[in-house]
Amino acid sequence: MGMPYRYQYETSPRKVKPEYTRKPKKYPKKSSMTRKKVKIEKNVKKEFVKKAKIIFLVLFVFSIVFAISYRNSLINEAYSKTEGLKSNLEKIERENEQIEVSIDNSLNLANIEQSAKELLGMTKLTSKQTIYITLPKQDYIESDSNKANEKKKRTFLDFLKDIF
């Protein structure tokens, strides 16, 4: 018969052996030449990656240096423009001062009289050229107070008469 039934003290179930066994996969054996080739290829790839990193780093540093130098050249160009504009401003201010002095000199009464004599051939009046006019002794000027009084004296009916 089979196994006698006995009381089992542990709580874990018994392990059942599998009916099959797993066979390991067999890979074809590589020759020593292919192993060397694989190692060489890996070394070549590592060297290529190292060189690529170095080249990338050099290009990155070069681009940063180029950006800094370009920025400095723009700053220098702007500075030279401002210096040129400042020098032009100084020239214009000097010219304005000279023009102001010449205008002040030309507005002098003695200069005006001299230029009138030389350029236009004018002379001063003599007593024979002066003509005196007698005017009647009436006041031709109306004061503002008279006008205000006239406006106050006008009534609403006078205003309507003027309109119609």
Image (spheres, helix red, strand yellow):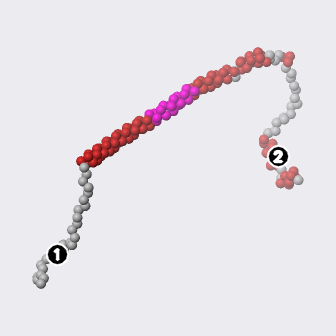
Left or right relative to 24: residue 117:
right
For image coordinates 74% across by 16% down, the residue present is 114
Amino acid, disc 1: Arg
* Above/below status of 62 relative to 12: above
**Which of 49/21 is in front?**
21
Sequence-earlier tag: 1 or 2: 1
* Above/below status of 39 relative to 26: above
**Which of 42/88 is in front?**
42
- Give the residue at mark 1: 14
**Residue 21, magenta (yes or no):** no
Q: Quadrant of the N terminus?
A: bottom left
For image coordinates 13% across by 82% down, the residue present is 2
In the image, which disc is placed on residue 150?
Answer: 2
Amino acid, disc 2: Glu
For image coordinates 53% across by 30% down, the residue present is 81
Q: Position of residue 30 (x, y in %)?
A: 25, 51
Magenta region: which residues?
68-88
- Labels 1 & 2 near each other (Cβ < 8 A): no
Residue 12 visible somewhere in the drawing: no
Measured in 3D between alpha carbons, the distance from the residue under mark 1 to the one under mark 2, in whole angstroms, is 136 Å
* Above/below status of 81 relative to 156: above
Q: Nearer the viewer, mark 1 or mark 2?
A: 1
Q: Secondary structure at mark 1?
A: loop
Residue 101 visible somewhere in the drawing: yes
For image coordinates 86% across by 21% down, the residue present is 131
